[in-house]
């Protein structure tokens, strides 16, 4: 088994690559180290992987069809964990062309190359944001998901639909996983968990949408990785599967937990919720449990305790 992990220097991708390497699998990491956030953090993620002899690191872009075709042709790729994307829901409101290009064209480039060599399984990272501001709770895969609130989820929904075309025309096994608010060690600095942890040390003011009266369904990185690894091992034809805990909490509660763990009061500013953000994310994970054997084990309190312990360790606190 040789797995291509695109975006393998990022938060989720590096954890997936690390677990595969620990299992003795051969892994190719493809990442362009873009500057959406500090590339040095991505370099540090890759550094965790460098001790494994079966790792091949390729610095490049998923939209580079020549490079992608060469990887598939020369490296005998059997599985793909496609995590690469232009991230950031709110950022996508002002950069529509970029998000559609990276997230849709990049996915098309990978699917084309994968179809030519007949890979065994293609796992596509999607997002719970595709559900938009739906009244149907919890979010279920049978929902239309045809009212995205920004270009990021629109590009991910388009990628899901394009993936079905490749399944239909080429018989490819493709599983699209809709991630729900992933957090944990080595988390992205632009996401709320890392912002809150930093705020306990530097006193920065956190913008709290609607006074914290929005709810998110947080999924610990370890559980998310387990779901992805299970999906890589289970070719199912074409499936879209939610990957989340199914237990949303308000952002005010989330802040309270971090304050309790750190013993620090976090300064917050009450701001309106931007039009890109729904009032709640809420995962129905029954399909993941049935098809992937997915069993999220880490509840929010424990997950934040682990994340806080990591944060203290890496910052010498």
Image (cartoon, rainbow, N blue to C red):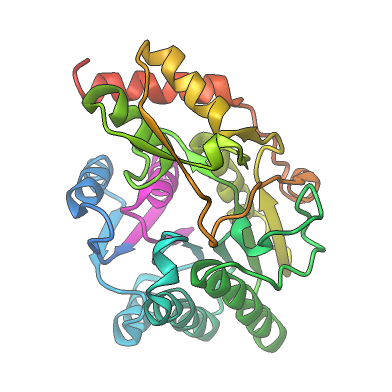
Looking at the image, residue 242 sits to the left or right of residue 123; the answer is right
Q: Residue at x 27, y 33 (%)?
A: 204
Q: Is residue 96 above or below residue 212?
A: below
Apparent side of residue 37 relative to residue 151 in the rendered image (left or right): left
Q: Position of residue 74 (x, y in %)?
A: 33, 76
Residue drawn 53% across and 74% down? Answer: 155
Residue furthest top in the image: 263
Image quadrant holding the C terminus, namely top left
Q: Report the residue at 65% width, 43% height from top.
A: 244
Q: Describe residue 147's horizontal placement relative to residue 222 as left or right.
A: right
Tell me, yes or no, whether the highlighted magenta stretch contains residue 202: no
The front one of 150 and 18 is 150
Which quarter of the picture shows residue 60?
Answer: bottom left
> Could you tell me which residue is drawn at 40 percent across and 82 percent down?
97
Q: Is residue 262 above or below residue 66?
A: above
Whether residue 198 can be seen here: yes
Q: Which percent across, then down, holds residue 58? A: 25, 65
Relative to 122, say whether 140 is above or below: above
Residue 18 is one of the magenta-drawn residues: yes
Q: Which residues are magenta?
A: 1-29
How far from the left and from the top, in percent, is residue 298? 59, 26
Residue 217: image x %, image y %? 63, 40
> Which picture quadrant has residue 315?
top left
In front of the other: 44 or 5 = 44
Residue nearest the observer in this picture, 313 or 144? 144
């Amino acid at each position: 088994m040789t797995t291509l992990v695109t975006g393998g220097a990022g938060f989720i991708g590096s954890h997936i690559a690390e677990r595969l390497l620990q299992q003795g699998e051969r892994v190719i990491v493809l990442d362009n180290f873009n500057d959406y956030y500090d590339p040095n953090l991505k370099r540090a993620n890759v550094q965790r992987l460098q001790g494994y002899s079966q790792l091949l690191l390729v610095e490049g872009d998923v939209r580079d069809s020549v490079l992608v075709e060469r990887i598939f042709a020369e490296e005998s790729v059997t599985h793909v964990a496609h995590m690469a994307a232009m991230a950031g829901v709110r950022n996508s409101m002002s950069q529509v062309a970029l998000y559609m290009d990276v997230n849709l064209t990049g996915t098309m480039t990978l699917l084309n190359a994968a179809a030519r060599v007949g890979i065994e399984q293609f796992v596509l990272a999607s997002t719970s944001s595709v559900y938009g501001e739906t009244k149907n709770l919890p979010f279920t895969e049978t929902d239309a998901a045809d009212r995205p609130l920004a270009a990021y989820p629109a590009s991910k929904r388009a990628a899901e639909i394009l993936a079905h075309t490749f399944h239909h025309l080429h018989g490819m096994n493709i599983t699209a996983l809709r991630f729900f608010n992933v957090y944990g060690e080595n988390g992205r600095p632009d996401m709320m968990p890392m912002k809150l942890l930093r705020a306990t040390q530097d006193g920065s003011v956190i913008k709290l949408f609607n006074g914290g009266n929005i709810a998110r369904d947080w999924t610990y990185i370890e559980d998310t990785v387990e779901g992805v690894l299970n999906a890589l091992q289970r070719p199912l034809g074409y499936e879209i599967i939610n990957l989340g805990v199914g237990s949303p909490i308000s952002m005010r509660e989330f802040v309270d937990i971090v304050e309790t763990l750190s013993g620090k009061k976090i300064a917050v500013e009450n701001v309106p919720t931007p039009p890109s953000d729904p009032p709640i994310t809420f995962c129905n994970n029954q399909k993941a449990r049935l098809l992937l054997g997915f069993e999220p084990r880490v509840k929010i309190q424990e997950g934040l305790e682990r994340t806080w312990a990591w944060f203290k360790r890496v910052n010498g606190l």
